[in-house]
Image: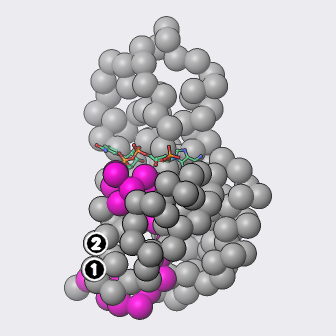
Amino acid sequence: MGISLKDKKILVIGRPSGIAGAVTLAVREQGAQVIVAGRDQGKLERAYDSDIAAEKVDVTDDRSIEALADRLGSIDHLVTTASARARGLLQDLDRDALRQSFDTKVIGPVMLAKHFAPRINDGGTFTLFSGVAASKPAIGFLGVAITNGAADFLTRSPERRPWRKAC
Ligand SMILES: NC(=O)c1ccc[n+]([C@@H]2O[C@H](COP(=O)([O-])OP(=O)(O)OC[C@H]3O[C@@H](n4cnc5c(N)ncnc54)[C@H](OP(=O)(O)O)[C@@H]3O)[C@@H](O)[C@H]2O)c1
């Protein structure tokens, strides 16, 4: 049995032309109140109809996350698709790209959970994204795989609130 999203307040982080855009439109269709967030608030405002509020957040910046949580107050569900893929062969990988990848897709969700968990209503969820690279090793995808492996592990954490892995 699915959960009803009618009148639920749902925060979706990510690009309008990607999975975040599809999630946003799908949950709005089910009667949810959707707030989209990303680094470029203007881009989000232009991408959606006016019934979808756009907010600014950088998931690698704790103050930005905390400020967003303060602005939104309580929410029902949070979905983050934010990622910064560190693709490439081992010899081409650099520390900054790997750090950015982890910061965006692993530490970012941990900090989102930290700041939003006290604000998520009973029955709420926190959804984050892994990727097939986590379970299918492939040449040129080491950075992507270890990031997604860590994101996978995060979904199994027994900390305070349930995690939900989308892919
Ligand atoms: N698409 C696929 O085929 C596929 C396959 C496997 C897994 N996944 C995973 O599914 C998720 C969604 O994929 P996608 O293809 O829709 O999106 P994507 O191309 O991975 O886009 C990621 C989004 O993250 C945002 N972002 C990057 N750094 C950020 C930051 N510091 N703060 C806030 N937002 C930030 C980007 O925002 P800007 O607009 O600001 O650049 C972009 O909107 C990702 O985690 C991806 O790894 C996707």
Residue 3 location in percent, x, y?
32, 85
Check disc 1 and report the residue beneath it. 29
Residue shown at 42% from the left, 18% from the top: 88
Residue 153 location in percent, x, y?
48, 50
Vertical relation: 76 (above or below) 22: below
Whether ligand 1 has any atom under 8 Å from the Cβ at mark 2 is answered as no
Whether ligand 1 has any atom under 8 Å from the Cβ at mark 1 is answered as no
Image quadrant in which you'd find residue 81: bottom left
Residue 86 location in percent, x, y?
48, 28
Check disc 2 and report the residue beneath it. 26
Image quadrant in which you'd find residue 119: bottom right
Vertical relation: 140 (above or below) 12: above
Vertical relation: 33 (above or below) 17: below
Residue type (three-letter) at the residue carrying disc 2: Ala
In the visual, does 84 lie left or right of 27? right
Magenta includes 111?
A: no
**Quadrant of the snapshot with the N terminus:** bottom left
Residue 27 location in percent, x, y?
33, 76
**Residue 15 or residue 90, whichever sits in front:** 15
Which region of the structure is painted magenta? Answer: 2-21
In the visual, does 87 lie left or right of 53? left
Whether residue 81 is visible, yes or no, is no
Whether residue 42 is visible, yes or no, is yes
- Label 2 element class: helix
Q: How many marks?
A: 2
Residue shown at 28% from the left, 83% from the top: 30
Q: Residue furthest left?
A: 1
Q: CA distance from mark 2 to mark 1?
A: 5 Å
Residue shown at 33% from the left, 35% from the top: 133
**Residue 125 or residue 72, whichever sits in front:** 72
